[in-house]
Image: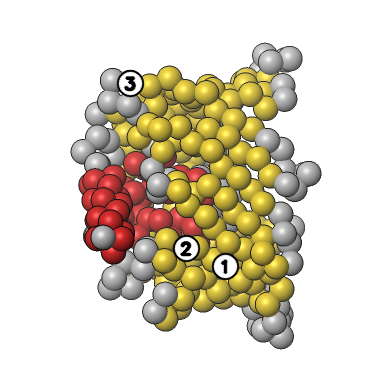
Amino acid sequence: MKKNLLALLGFVFIFYVQAQESDVSIKLKQITSIETNTKTGEYITKKYTFQDGKLASIKTSDIIQSFFYNSNGYLERTVRENEMSGWKEVATYEYDTRHNLIKYVNEYEEGGKSVTKTITYKYDGNKIRAITKKSNSPLKFVQWIDYTLENGRIVNESERDINEKVISNKRIDYIEGDLIAYKGVFGDRSTDSYDYDDKQSAMRLVVQNVFGKNYKTIVTLIAPHEKEFPLESISYHNFLKFSSTTPSKKEYQYTYTYNEMDYPKTHVEHTGLLKTIVSYEYE
């Protein structure tokens, strides 16, 4: 009886996940973010545009980031540039035949000089090894992280030093498809916590259409290097609140309104003097 119950619960969970994953009929058309300094009244507008549900560009007053896709529909390159100057930053993404991310290259300026950061990802069963090298460093590598996969999601990461010794270990916890905690187990023992609502996530629509079926793995690998794809964006529900045991990381939270399809219509964030209002349009 107990075995039958466990089997039934497992089936229900798999069905729930499949239902969540298949809900991609709704598409984003535009996201507009307006950040206002409540003391001075100054504001910054940031506009995300989409083409057939895929993120096409992110634009502020003087910076535009453009997104380009390969023949399979996966993100291949981004170009971030200042339209008023010659400044430019380029990132490229390479995949294997299973659409796993195998290389990320970022070309940017650091201290007035051009730098290329290259991360290679090697897969072995449920393990991923990420080796980071920088063109301005004489070191064999500047970062080595081993990841562990479980059900298509990264659940653990260990960082090694130049002598291949583990210097930190972190665990990622999930509940009902939501990433709820990023916990230090060895080395840095701090914990970052994430809370969610019970509605459909708009940010998951973004990353699903950018990275395809492996979005949960790829976003976790890319999040430290690309701020537009944060860890919480892989979750099924909308992010509500962030808190951390690290004093330097400040708590913040969102307040939502929703449309008739239970997707976000707007969300508001207050951080000190800054108030950010984000609106979502769908097609």
Query: Residue 105: x percent and y percent?
Result: 51, 66
Residue 155 placement, left or right of 109: left
User: How far separated are the C-alphas under marks 1 and 3?
Assistant: 37 Å
Residue 96 placement, left or right of 251: left
Residue type at the position of mark 3: Asn
Question: Which element is circle 2 on?
Answer: strand
Q: Which residue is found at the position 34% from the left and 49% from the top?
A: 208
Please say if the residues under marks 2 and 1 sit with CB atoms less than 8 Å apart.
yes
User: How far separated are the C-alphas under marks 3 and 2?
Assistant: 32 Å
Query: Residue 281: x percent and y percent?
Result: 34, 25
Per the image, the residue denoted by label 1 is: 157
Query: Residue 263: x percent and y percent?
Result: 34, 28
Mark seen at residue 48: none
Per the image, the residue denoted by label 3 is: 259
Residue extending farthest to the bottom is 163
Check the picture and name the quadrant holding the C terminus. Answer: top left
